[in-house]
Amino acid sequence: MKNKTVNLLDQARAITKYWSPKVVGEVDDSYLKVAKVKGEFTWHDHEEDELFMVLDGRLKIEMEGQTIQLQAGEVYVVPKGVKHKPLAVDECLIMLFEKKTTLHTGKTSTALTKDISEQL
Amino acid sequence: MKNKTVNLLDQARAITKYWSPKVVGEVDDSYLKVAKVKGEFTWHDHEEDELFMVLDGRLKIEMEGQTIQLQAGEVYVVPKGVKHKPLAVDECLIMLFEKKTTLHTGKTSTALTKDISEQL
């Protein structure tokens, strides 16, 4: 995952399943991932911070008390412990940056949940 | 640095000095930075991995034995301990992701070196 050039949009476009992140890089104890999303994800939180960046399209992140909207080139870090629900009306390509230990849907397990082995 | 939306290009464009990264976000023990670069930086290495992403323009990273070239949307992780020299023929805007402990020019101190307090 090091020593290679990664085109984020190409990697994200090649994904065939929504809400199924793919690891495309590692930086020490963190993973860089891309995902293709559409519709609503599940409410969850993590024990670590989670960085979202929109590569193409628009992403909403609902949190308790606020909803933020991101467009291409915009970044938002959901702090650890903050419940959030990402959603996208239309198909959206995103980049994620998070610890290798971060669980896809936190302690919540849903039909959408992907183990890290499914993201590599 | 959390709980706010950051437009990476806007942040990078607003920088007035080349090779002077600006912290625009934090994810646990790592910083997200943007920088405006042109010309040659100095040879150095870090005790941690360092992620480069080009936001606009073209960046070269010279390493011992190879040189890679990145364009907008492309990412490269320079592994810890690998000596590298970033350079850009024309002005280029980049994003960096690295540990909070990562030193700007590693153990090498040059006229370009910025302490972390100058990046916040």
Image (cartoon, coloured by chain):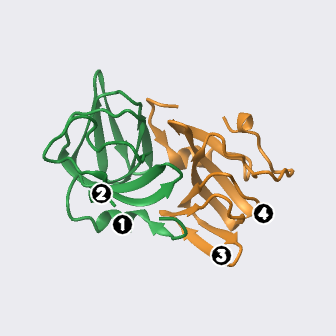
Chain colours: A green, B orange
Q: Could you classify mark 2 by the number of other residues whose Cα lies within 10 Å: few (under 14), some (14-19), or many (20 or more)?
A: few
- Helix, strand or loop at disc 1? helix
Residue at the far left: name it: A111
Q: Could you classify mark 4 by the number of other residues whose Cα lies within 10 Å: few (under 14), some (14-19), or many (20 or more)?
A: some
Q: Residue at x 64, y 42 (%)?
A: B22
Q: CA distance from mark 3 to mark 4?
A: 13 Å
Q: CA distance from mark 4 to mark 2?
A: 37 Å
Q: CA distance from mark 3 to mark 1?
A: 22 Å
The residue beneath circle 2 is A117
- Please check whether the numbered discs 4 and 2 fall on a single chain: no
- The amino acid marked with disc number 3 is Thr
- Please check whether the numbered discs 1 and 4 fall on a single chain: no
Q: Nearer the N terminus, badge 2 or badge 1?
A: 1
- Helix, strand or loop at disc 2? helix
Give the x, y percent position of residue A120: 34, 61
Q: Residue at x 59, y 48 (%)?
A: B98
Q: CA distance from mark 2 to mark 1?
A: 18 Å
The residue beneath circle 1 is A11
Q: Could you classify mark 3 by the number of other residues whose Cα lies within 10 Å: few (under 14), some (14-19), or many (20 or more)?
A: few
Q: Nearer the viewer, mark 2 or mark 1?
A: 2
Task: Name the chain letter of the residue that bears numbered label 3.
Answer: B
Q: Is residue A78 left or right of residue A85?
A: right
* Label number found at residue B67: 3
Q: Are the residues at dot 4 and dot 2 in contact (C-beta closer than 8 Å)?
A: no
